[in-house]
Amino acid sequence: MNPRRHPSHRLLKAFSEGNAPPAVAMTIAVHLAHCGECTDSVSELEAAAGEALVTGQEASVAPTALSRLLARVDSDGGPEVAAGHQAETVGHLTLPPCLPKRMVGFRRWLTPDLWTAPIKTPQVDGWRTFLLHAPKGLQVPVHGHRGGELIAVLSGSFADGIRYGAGDFAESSAGSAHGLTVGEDGPCMCVIAMEGRAKWAGWARAVSMVLDV
């Protein structure tokens, strides 16, 4: 993979400081598993924060950083995985090491090629994480977001005016709206972190209830 779309500096900084909610941290970790550029950026941010502590400079750490970090430690898994982790699969996809199969819940199907599965991360600050598998050519109706949405593409591609391929990272802010079209290069599977629920209209609302998105 050669990712072209990456998390913002703000997200990478929050991740490096342990300030990101577990769902956000998981989605970023999935991107890092495929992106050497962002992995290097996180290492540099961590090194800078460590140097600031050693030299006595004021480090930029949110007041809730410790509680967020402990939530990640206490969760059933997370971005850090013990050495010796064996590759596991869900459907046709080999999961990245940061996402062991035990963290993936039961799948909910609308069609044989369209399903979601929750990822077991603590729901901190209203964030949750799930896998979405969609068939090629699927058009997802325009929908709005009450909170943020982060998407790490594991396989296939989708477009919302910008094309996102395997390894890419999409970031939408609260109040934004978009429609998606899955590429013709095969099914698209993504890890999605969502803050609250998306806003759907018409028949799409019924679909979202079945898939829990």
Image (cartoon, rainbow, N blue to C red):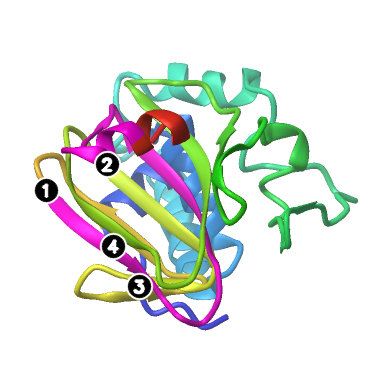
Residue 151 placement (x, y as % from top left): 40, 54
Q: Mark 1 points at which residue?
A: 176
> Residues under labels 2 and 1: Cα distance?
17 Å
Q: State the mark number for residue 204.
A: 2
Residue 57 placement (x, y as % from top left): 30, 40
> Residues under labels 1 and 4: Cα distance?
13 Å
Q: In the rendered view of the protein, which quadrant contains the C terminus?
A: top left
Residue located 33% across and 22% down the image = 126
Mark in the foreground, 3 or 4:
4
> Residues under labels 3 and 1: Cα distance?
18 Å
The residue under label 1 is which amino acid type?
Ser
The residue under label 4 is which amino acid type?
Leu
Q: Which of 150 and 36 is in front in this view?
A: 150
Mark in the foreground, 2 or 3:
2
Q: Name the residue under label 4.
A: 180
For the record, the magenta segment spans 177-206
Q: Name the residue under label 3.
A: 5
The residue under label 3 is which amino acid type?
Arg
Residue 122 placement (x, y as % from top left): 52, 21
Say which element carries label 1.
Answer: loop
Residue 68 placement (x, y as % from top left): 45, 23
> In this rendering, is residue 140 above or below 149?
below
**Residues at discs 2 and 3 in contact (Cβ within 8 Å):** no
Give the residue at the far left of this rendering. 175
Callout 2: 10 Å neighbours few (<14), some, many (20+)? some
Say which element carries label 3.
Answer: loop
Q: Image check: 187 left or right of 63?
A: right
